[in-house]
Amino acid sequence: EGNLMAGKRGVVMGVANQNSIAWGISQQLAAQGAEIAFTYQGESLERRVRPLVESIGMDTMIPADVTDDASMDAAFAAIKEKWGTIDFLVHSIAFAGKEELQGSMVANTTREGFRRAMDISVFSFIDSARRASELMPDGGSMICMTYLGAERVIPSYNVMGVAKAALEASTRYAARDLGPQGIRVNAISAGAMRTLSLAGIKGSKSLMSTGKDMSLLKENTRMEGVAGSALYLLSDLGHSVTGEVLHVDAGFHVVGVPEPSEE
Ligand code: NAD
């Protein structure tokens, strides 16, 4: 517990259940004194998200489907109505169909699948950044969640890797556009973590075990590291850091070739 986020208010988008990265981040921010408004995908998730939100003494929950302009208009209007201004935004949302998250990227990426992955996983960040920035007259900080599949080829990750590359580029352009307004924009590139989204990727088990075996720390990415990095970027500790992609993956991203097994 501390006060690194005391007096700061913000929006967290993307809590689906207790394993969500957005939830790990939220707990850390709340423990440091942040006030959080949560947006969630829709009615079917409310039952699972409400007890979490209440467990940290918060009560602002707003449905927001990022593919629906009216829903996004209403969500940000509600936040403006509640607080007037905000200090931070956490975007922790992505989607691609099961059909796309396996086998050949070339063979399995349809026009509709591509459009949907890019809309939900990339445009939604640009759109949310614009909406949130309008509520940040005194500056602020935003983060989104990305993965190594943006930079390297990862089995089954396919069109989501393409989307994450676009998300990382969007982070840099948003940082350029919003910098003069004192808003920092960064991405956290987390290693594989056991969540609902990961389960949608074919072979996700081996993604976890390879991540562990090949990482420099010989462990899977821990939520406390991801949440701590979010805290750093969203609090005043992160002053002067913008347009960055911060890897929080036990060092997996720097490995070229795995160590040879003992002869
Ligand atoms: P998660 O399933 O808990 O979170 C994904 C969230 O996206 C859910 O809350 C879901 O409701 C939301 N979402 C999907 N479509 C939506 C829509 N149309 N409108 C509103 N919300 C929508 O899984 P997670 O692993 O916590 O994923 C969060 C972020 O972290 C994603 O961007 C993901 O790509 C990224 N990430 C995950 C890992 C991992 O290994 N789990 C690693 C690196 C990055």
Image (cartoon, rainbow, N blue to C red):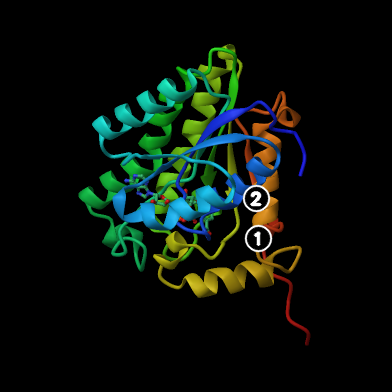
Quarter of the rendering occupied by the C terminus? bottom right
Near mark 2 (Cα within 10 A), the count class, few <14, some 14-19 or many ≥20, is many
Q: Are marks 1 and 2 in contact (CB under 8 Å)?
A: yes
Quarter of the rendering occupied by the N terminus? top right
Instruction: Identify whether 122 is placed above or below 255.
Output: above
Q: Residue at x 60, y 74 (%)?
A: 209
Q: Looking at the image, which residue sits at the far bottom?
A: 263
Which residue, given by chain and number where applicable, does mark 2 sit on? 226
Tell me, for residue 29, which label it has, or none: none
Q: Position of residue 57 (x, y in %)?
A: 58, 44
Q: Which image quadrant for residue 235?
A: top right
Instruction: Identify whether 255 is placed above or below 236.
Output: below
- Residue 204 left/right relative to 223: left
Type of amino acid under label 1: Thr
Type of amino acid under label 2: Val
Q: Residue at x 57, y 69 (%)?
A: 208
Q: Position of residue 64 (x, y in %)?
A: 34, 39
Q: Nearer the viewer, residue 88 or 53?
A: 53
Q: CA distance from mark 1 to mark 2?
A: 8 Å
Near mark 1 (Cα within 10 A), the count class, few <14, some 14-19 or many ≥20, is many
- Asked which secondary structure carries label 2, the reply is helix
Which residue, given by chain and number where applicable, does mark 1 sit on? 221
* Among numbered discs 1 and 2, the one appearing first in the sequence: 1
- Asked which secondary structure carries label 1, the reply is loop
Instruction: Identify whether 30 is placed above or below 243.
Output: below
For label 1, being within 8 Å of ligand 1 is answered: yes
